[in-house]
Amino acid sequence: MTQEATQAVSRVVPGAGGLPPAVQALAQADFSGVAQLFVNAGFTVALPAPGMLQVVKPGEARASVAVSVGVHGDETGPIEVLAHLLDALSRDASKLAVDLLVCVGNVDAIRAGKRFIDADLNRMFRPVRGSLAQAAESARADEMIVATKAFFAAAGPVRWHLDLHTAIRPSVYPTFAIVPDLVADDAKAQLIDWLGQAAIGAIIMNPQSAGTYSYYSAEHFGAAASTVELGRVGTLGQNDLSLFDDVSRALDGLLRGLPGQPVKAQPHVFKVAQEIIKHSDEFRMAFDRSTQNFTSLPQHAVIASDGDHVYTVQHAEELVVFPNPDVRVGLRAGLMVVRTS
């Protein structure tokens, strides 16, 4: 993080409910304060949908960067990180070096302190939603799609989308990212380099969509996109922000167009070996809820059963990521990955 950003974070004072004003505003999808500061600095600013802020500099060739948080309402650490960064940057608005789209995803769930209202918003970015079509999150996904499409429609060739999350379970790699395999090679290399600067420990190259926001941006708008997992879920206002220092610094540098920082350690790279899909209410996983992301399983080990079908490890070793037997029927209940580098 720049010195200006660090000083701005240190100046925040609690507002109503004990939250710093910047955090409270972002969590409530209130961009009025930062929007005016960017307007004053000569940017064109729009609020294309509730919880979305667009800041562009017309007539200049700039990278276009979308940053989203709160797609799951209980993943609060990235909300706090982005709130402080955006507050600091708006007070030094001329330093914004990219066209920027900020999206606070599931605003209603954030207010309710829940993961979602009716269904997982990060499974809604798909052409056919089936039983999910009537969920409150379906309408919210439509708003996000329209605003994101409009943002990238006017963008140049350099397009990024960083969708910041935290995980439900503990993980062998406390921070990790999922990158769509279809991202163009040059853009993918730049994204992986940035993830290394952000001290992301592992990267999963994903060959197909599970209806996530980041995959949608990559597939439909050509963005170098990633779902970035930054530790564990937490209560808004009670996160240890020191755990986010590396990603804060890297994100601040990206938005300000600063030279990249040295990579502390190259992330380990994995590819998806198989998706575990829940096909019925008989679905059962072979391990308990204490199982960490990236837990290793040997060849032929049982992963899950679903009626007569049994999922087993096909390679000499596979690691389980996002195991969740509680998803709706028809959705992904986990990934099995193998390390490639």
Image (spheres, rainbow, N blue to C red):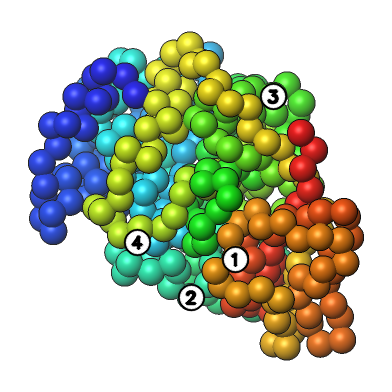
Residue that mark 2 sits on: 118
SS class, disc 3: helix
Q: Residue at x 13, y 54 (%)?
A: 18
Residue under the point 60% across and 75% down: 288
Q: Amino acid at mark 1?
A: Thr
**Cα gap from disc 3 to disc 4, whole angstroms:** 33 Å
Closer to the chain start, of discs 1 and 3, is: 3
Q: Which residue is mark 1?
A: 291
Q: Secondary structure at mark 4?
A: helix
Where is residue 196 drawn, in percent x and y?
57, 27
- The answer to whether 116 appears left or right of 18 in the picture is right
Could you say which quadrant of the image residue 117 lies in?
bottom left
- The label shown at residue 189 is 3
Circle 2: is it few (<14), some (14-19), or many (20+) Cα within 10 Å?
few
Q: Quick one: label 4 or label 2, which is nearer the N terminus? A: 4
Q: Residues within 10 Å of mark 3 (few under 14, many from 20)?
A: few
Task: Examine the rendered structure and indicate whether residue 182 appears above or below residue 130.
Answer: above
Quarter of the image with the C terminus in it: top right
Cα separation between marks 2 and 1: 26 Å
Nearer the observer, disc 1 or disc 3?
1
Q: Which residue is mark 4?
A: 110
Determine the CA span between mark 2 and mark 3. 37 Å
The quadrant of the image that shows the N terminus is top left
Pick whichever, 57 or 244, lies toward us: 244
Q: Are marks 4 and 1 in contact (CB under 8 Å)?
A: no
Dot 3 amino acid type: Ala
For the residues labelled 2 and 1, say whether their Cβ atoms are less than 8 Å apart. no
| Foreground tag (4 vs 1) | 1
Marks 4 and 1, how far apart at CA = 26 Å
Amino acid type of disc 4?
Answer: Ile
Residue at image position (36%, 53%) is 76
Q: Earlier in the sequence, mark 2 or mark 3?
A: 2
